[in-house]
Image (cartoon, rainbow, N blue to C red):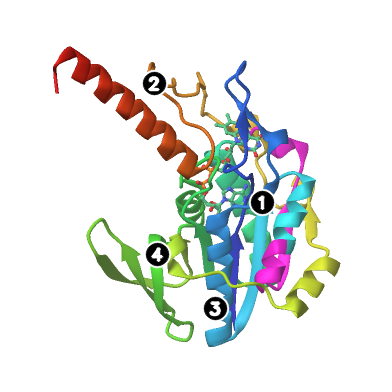
Amino acid sequence: MLHIVACIKQVPDTKIIKMNPKTNTMDRRTAPAILNPYDAHAVEEAVRIKNRYGGHVSVVTMGPPPAVNAIKTCIEIGADEGYLITDRRFAGADTLATSYAVTKAIEKIAKIKPVDLIICGKMSIDGDTGQVGPGIARRLDIPPLTSVNKVEEINQEEGFAIVHRKLEEGYEVVKSTLPCLFSVEKTINEVPYSPLPNMLKAARYKPHIWSVDDLEDVDIKQLGLKGSPTIVSKVWAPQKPAGGTFFEGSPAAQVEQLLSVLFEKKELFETKGEV
Ligand SMILES: Cc1cc2nc3c(=O)[nH]c(=O)nc-3n(C[C@H](O)[C@H](O)[C@H](O)COP(=O)(O)OP(=O)(O)OC[C@H]3O[C@@H](n4cnc5c(N)ncnc54)[C@H](O)[C@@H]3O)c2cc1C
């Protein structure tokens, strides 16, 4: 039976979040926390592979205690088990420290049930780096297959996977040994509405919650802020373009406003004899 681990992250909904105009940082209180949309596709693909070949889907996340809700969303999609690693010592982690902590969690999950495949989203919508997946693969010394937009075959007996990787023009077909790690494009699948039994299961589901002390062979220096060489030297919001006119209201109202500006300009040119 295949064991697939999907790595997921809870993120603020960046469609709703507002910037603090004084500090130019995201005001996280203004947006609800959601499952990173790319990760919903990662979990959906893991569930599809399970339904095709038989198997078990675990999800794992490093985050604060409310990240339990993101795990519940994954159970609604069809995941079987969820693991949250949460501890103040993880706080302030950049992508290097995040990939280290998540790798330690996967190593522990693999002791419970050996892991054949790890699936990540292409990127998170708040960090946007796309570094965590390849970072995990590097640490586990398994092949990273990025930009996967179709899973052609998973053959556990012969130990290989065949996938399509999206390229700028077209795609390439890649065969890899198992275990390996995919990071998936949103185009890989559509996430359907969850069936009622999954929703009921999710409502009652209690994920496994681990602290740093529950993981094995952890080098504390590689966790959290201490293990994060990234320095964010400045954060700023892009300048609004100077000049111009901002239209408000419904699209129809905005078209009206645009037309009246254009007519005004036309009249001006006509009086100057330029048209
Ligand atoms: C100095 C510094 C301090 C930071 N402090 C914090 C902090 O205190 N709290 C905080 O929330 N963020 C913090 N961040 C942001 C944090 O480092 C990143 O969000 C995190 O490392 C993931 O990187 P990313 O968002 O670019 O993910 P990407 O690499 O774009 O994500 C790709 C995929 O990796 C997987 N993935 C990403 N993150 C996780 C995760 N946490 N658990 C499991 N799988 C995951 C998902 O499958 C995701 O789709 C900090 C960043 C810096 C630079």
What amino acid is labelled 1 in the image?
A: Ile
What is the distance, in whole Å, between disc 3 and disc 1 at their CAs?
A: 22 Å
Q: Whole-Å distance between the Cαs marked 4 and 3?
A: 14 Å
Name the spot of residue 223 as percent of width and height, x first: 64, 38
Disc 1 element: strand
| Residue at (52% x, 24% y) in the render | 231
Residue that badge 4 annotates: 148
**Residue name at image x 69 percent, y 39 percent:** 90
How dense is the environment of label 4, judged by Cα within 10 Å: few (below 14), some, or many (20 and up)?
A: many
Q: Which mark is residue 34?
A: 1
Question: In which quadrant of the rendered image does the C terminus lie?
Answer: top left
Amino acid bearing label 2 = Pro
Q: Residue furthest front?
A: 271
Q: Which residue is mark 2?
A: 241
Q: Secondary structure at mark 3?
A: helix
Q: Looking at mark 1, is its residue's CB closer than 8 Å to ligand 1?
A: no
Front label number (3 vs 2): 2
Which numbered disc, 3 or 1, marks the residue closer to the eye?
A: 1
**Secondary element at tag 4:** strand
Q: Are marks 3 and 1 in contact (CB under 8 Å)?
A: no
- Whichever of labels 4 and 3 marks the residue nearer the N terminus, that label is 3
Q: Which residues are magenta?
A: 73-92
Residue 156 visible to an observer of this rendering = yes
**Is 58 placed left or right of 251 in the picture?**
right
Mark identifier at residue 174: none
Residue plotted at (31% across, 70% down): 174
Q: Indicate which disc, 2 or 4, sits on the residue closer to the N terminus.
A: 4
User: Does the residue at mark 4 contact the one at mark 1 (Cβ under 8 Å)?
Assistant: no
| Mark 2 secondary-structure assignment | loop
Measured as percent of width and height from the top left, residue 69 is found at: 75, 56
